[in-house]
Amino acid sequence: MLYPMAALVLLTFFVALMMLKARIQAVHNKDVSIKYFKSYDQPARELPERMVITQRCYNNLLEIPPLFYAVCLAALALHSTGVIMAVLAWLYVACRVVQAAIHLGRNNVIWRMRVFLLSNLVLLAMWTYMVIAYAAR
């Protein structure tokens, strides 16, 4: 369970670096004033699209994934890290990688939504499996 968590952490840092790059580029191109980052008060529609997309992708990696980290840590603590949990964990990470690639690439909303839904179903399966395994003890 540690390796899938580490992989998702690496993805999060990778997207954070892409977000930083987009922000630096926006300031360098004078599309955004450095003062914007004091209060973030400028509407998204007035910001460079690349900056908004990378920021949104980064935020996505901080919203539902904490539930993934929690179930992985629970699996470690309860010694329930069998093959099924490992496969589900890697499937979740793969979904999040694909979702981020879509988001940062062509940003096809329909495909991004489908992968997002799949990742959430996998996460729900992880939690369901964990609860059932714990209850069966």
Image: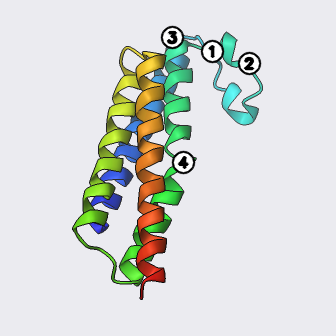
Image vertical order of residue 124 relative to residue 32, above or below: below
Looking at the rendered image, the disc whose residue lies closer to the viewer, 1 or 3, is: 1
> 38 or 117, which is in the foreground?
117
The mark nearer the N terminus, 2 or 4, is 2
Where is mark 3, residue-wise?
29
Do tag 1 and tag 3 residues touch (Cβ < 8 Å)? no
Q: Nearer the viewer, residue 123 or 101?
A: 123
Q: Are the two marked residues, 2 and 4, in contact with CB atoms closer than 8 angstroms?
A: no
Query: Residue under circle 2?
Result: 43
User: What colouring style does the render use?
Assistant: rainbow
The answer to whether residue 117 is visible is: yes
Disc 3 versus disc 2: nearer the observer = 2
**Which circle's residue, 4 or 1, is located before the other in the chain?**
1
Residue plotted at (68% across, 12% down): 45
Dot 1 and dot 2 residues touching (CB under 8 Å): yes
The span from disc 3 to disc 2 (Cα, nearest Å) is 18 Å
**What is the spatial separation of the Cα atoms under label 1 and label 3, in whole angstroms?**
12 Å
Q: Which residue is mark 1?
A: 47
**Disc 3: CA contacts within 10 A as few (<14), some (14-19) or many (>=20):** few
Residue 16 in picture, x, y percent from top left: 44, 39
Q: Which mark is residue 62?
A: 4
Q: Position of residue 21 (x, y in %)?
A: 42, 28
**Alpha-carbon distance for marks 2 and 4?**
21 Å
Label 4 is placed on what type of residue? Leu
